[in-house]
Image (tube, grey):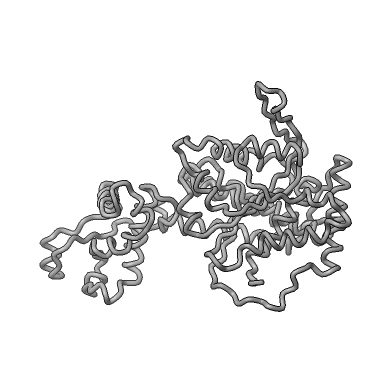
Amino acid sequence: PRPVKEVAIVATLGLLAGICGKSFSIPQSGLNLYIILVARSAIGKEAMHSGVASLMESVRSRLPQAMNFVDFSDFASGPALSKAVAANTSFCNIAGEWGKKLRRLSKEDKNDGPMQQLRTVMTNLYQKSGPASIVGGITYSNKEQNIAAVSGVAYSMIGETTPKTLYESLTESMMDDGFLSRFTIIEYEGERPPHNYSAIHEPDQPLSDALAQLCHHSLTLLHRNARQEVLRDEESAEILFRFDKECDERINGIEDEAQRQMWNRAALKVTRIAALLAVADNFLNPIIQKVHVDWALEVVRKDIYSMQKKLLAGDVGTDDYSRERKVVSIMRDHISNGAAKSYGIDPKMVAHGVIPKRLILSRTSRLSSFTTHRMGSTVALNQTLQSLMDSGDIAEVPKDVLVKEYHFHGKCYRLIQLNEESLT
């Protein structure tokens, strides 16, 4: 109804991963994916849910079992998800209001046990889609509640949230322990598109027929406990090999754990996405080709570079680290682009890289990472500035210099470290 390419891409990849995640494989792995759609409210993200539902409903009448490939449940705990994958080993969970759940998953105070269990189970399941993988069961004192161990679970999930909710919910531990690196983030930054009144609300027959054939083929493989390997041609194999080496070099060249984790599973995500595209093109004889790898690389690289940019800008999280990065980002932007005339800052101060505290205060006073500080945004800023001075990233400009050179009587700072790499 409101055409947004990114919404369609997330829905398509999620549905393909649910159908093909276990029945098709690459070396030592199935094709499951975790994807988060990030977009502002009211742009039509709900079409991700209704579109998948409409597609699968068109298949249900002739192939009822195909509905097992999607699940719209809201799993409230780790055991609930473990029980679901024990009963159904290949499906995509299409999660609503994922941002709210992410807030709970991010809490480190251990007061929300079910969500911490869910985070642990999701972390483990991502790597358990390979033919030789075993997902451990759960044993309770009441034997009727026991959950059996199963092999090769291809659990996929897609969810949607807003940029503010996502980036404020992320914590350092989420990035350090690899939880975030399992997700592919696809972001839409555009405006709300006009309503497409001519949109067809039911899939056309050729698309429905093709989807039914793919589901039937996948179900046949699952019933035989068989897997179909997705091969790769020589050119795509070389591109994947080079990207894997690039990921090694990136990881070895970065000290910051959060940034190392971004590259940790990048090659695996590219291969899984490329394999799903190959299956969609020809599920009887799927072969990864250059066009599949190129497209998958674009998705994954965009995700990594966007997250790196937001990390450096202090837009991720609400902790001390994010506040320091945000202040440094504001100062860098002031040096590069100057300030609006409304701030009334002497152009000579801008040229000399002298940044008034009131400018920094104005630009941080409404940011969540500062307003959510237990002592308020002003105290948060003062502590952040002091920490940056202690670490040698910035320096306060002496008052006598400010008065003599610029006739300015407030506090000002200079950025000492200009190189972004030195600030990570």
Front position in the image: 415 or 78: 78
Residue 328 found in image quarter: bottom left
Query: Taking 316 as reference, is 376 left or right?
Result: left
List x then y, in percent, for residue 182: 60, 47
Q: Is residue 301 visible?
A: no
Residue 420 placement, left or right of 400 = right
On screen, residue 335 above or below 255:
below
Please indicate, yes or no, whether residue 114 appears anywhere in the rendered image: yes
Q: x, y (%) of residue 301?
A: 59, 59
In which quadrant is the N terminus drawn?
A: bottom right
Marks counted in the figure total: 0
Q: Considering depth in this image, is 50 or 184 the residue closer to the camera?
A: 50
Q: In percent of the image, x 68 and y 78: which residue is there? A: 197
Indicate the quadrant where residue 39 lies: bottom right
Q: Is residue 77 above or below residue 184?
A: above
Residue 299 pos. (x, y %) = 63, 60
Q: Residue at x 27, y 77 (%)?
A: 341
Left or right: where 236 falls relative to 78: right
* Residue at 32%, 56% in the rendered image: 417
Q: Please give left or right for residue 104 compared with residue 199 in the image.
A: left
Q: Residue at x 34, y 63 (%)?
A: 332
Q: Residue furthest top?
A: 141
Please say if 233 is above or below 85: below
Residue 69 at what x, y percent from top left?
77, 50
The quadrant holding residue 53 is bottom right
User: Between 148 and 35, which is closer to the camera in this rendering?
Assistant: 148
Identify whether 300 is placed above or below 222.
below
